[in-house]
Image (spheres, rainbow, N blue to C red):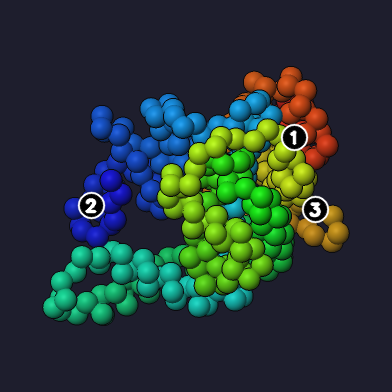
Amino acid sequence: MWLVFNTPELVAEHKQHSKLQLVPTVISPDGKAMQDSTPIIEALELLVPGPSIHPSGVAAKFISQLLEEFADEWGNKWMMHYRWYSSKSGVDVASYSRRVAVERKSGAHLDTEGLGEQITGLAQAFKGRMLDRGFTVGSNDRTAPIIEQSFLDSIILMDAHLAKRPFLFGRTPSLADFGLAGQLYQCFQDVTAGELMRLHAPNVASWSERMVNPTHVCGGGFETWETLAETLAPFLSSQVLMFLRWSDANSRALSAEAKELSVDFGDGKVWQQTVGGPQRYHAKSLREIRRKFAAVANDPVLHGVLSSSGCLEYLAESAASKL
């Protein structure tokens, strides 16, 4: 059951179980709380293993895991940037702040006194809380063009891939679908990013809606990497490679206790941001995806895919040992 923070009791319950107040919380029947989306979905997969969210074949399964990692750690930059920090995000800020405020008051009676003023106050408070947090995703004047180009390049590449199939790995939703949909459905619901998706990537827009309840169209299994490679490999060699370069540089900056992070992506694109608390979680996530890769690193198909895309050097043990 999904619970919205629309009563003081639910707010208090969430605080009781949550270490971080900014992200959703899953509470199991035994009272254990989880907040990280990747272990949450992995735990649920163990409880309900069928239909599986993992494509068959070592290469396809790991690439799905890598794309989910990409979604969590890079895709959130698209969503947060367009919603809050872009030079064009004024309409998004106003719309989403009010949406959150209305959710917090959901279930209110029609005759609730001062309801409009309460919603306006909540919206203003939430907006004020979020507008100065661009550093959490690295959004600033220098990085804004990189984030926005990455979003456009990504949805166009995905659009070509999804033209031939309902989900990223075939006719069944994978871990990668759930990870990317978590970010892109939010983009789809927002004004600016949603308009860009409808305009330039209609297949991605349809997929985003489909992922709200994919069960009624899933069935037919996963494809092999051979049939996926033509349109999915370009996504790895451009967007995922960019993310891994950033993630590796972030880990190195943290290890060196540097205050600034700088990554040269080539073609005049240089990413610069401050290094702080939020980036420590990204470093932890990189260690985890490297751990998963180490377990399957000897697979020849996977090795070839990652090598040709440029991703291998950032996932291999040699990269981790330099930190």
First of labels 2, 1 by sequence position: 2
On the image, numbered disc 3 is attached to which residue?
A: 265
Q: Which mark is residue 306?
A: none
- Bin the neighbour count of mark 3 within 10 Å (Cα to Cα): few under 14, some 14-19, many 20 and up: some
| Mark 1 burial class by Cα count in 10 Å: few <14, some 14-19, many 20+ | few
| Above-or-below relation of 70 to 201 | above
Vertical position of residue 303 compared to residue 96: above or below: above
Which type of secondary structure does the marked residue at label 3 adopt? strand
Residue 36 in the image, given as x and y percentages of width and height: 45, 40
Label 2 sits on a secondary structure element that is helix
Give percent across and percent down for residue 323: 71, 32
| Mark in the foreground, 1 or 3 | 1
In the shown orientation, is residue 268 left or right of residue 79? right
Is residue 314 in view? Answer: no
* Circle 2 Cα neighbour tier, 10 Å, few/some/many (<14 / 14–19 / ≥20): few
Residue on which the image places disc 2: 10
Distance (Cα) linking label 3 and label 2: 44 Å
Amino acid type, mark 2: Leu
Q: What percent of the width, then of the height, locates residue 167?
A: 58, 46
Q: Amino acid at mark 1?
A: Glu
**Res. 4 in view:** yes
Q: Earlier in the sequence, mark 1 or mark 3?
A: 1
Q: Amino acid at mark 3?
A: Phe
Q: Position of residue 66 (x, y in %)?
A: 63, 38
In the rendered structure, find residue 226 and report the number of the disc placed on it.
Answer: 1
Residue shown at 43% from the left, 44% from the top? 215
Asked if the residue at tag 2 contacts the one at tag 3, i.e. Cβ–Cβ closer than 8 Å, the answer is: no
Residue 104 lies, with reference to residue 234, above or below; the image says below
Q: Secondary structure at mark 1?
A: helix
Q: Residue drawn 53% across and 42% down?
A: 173
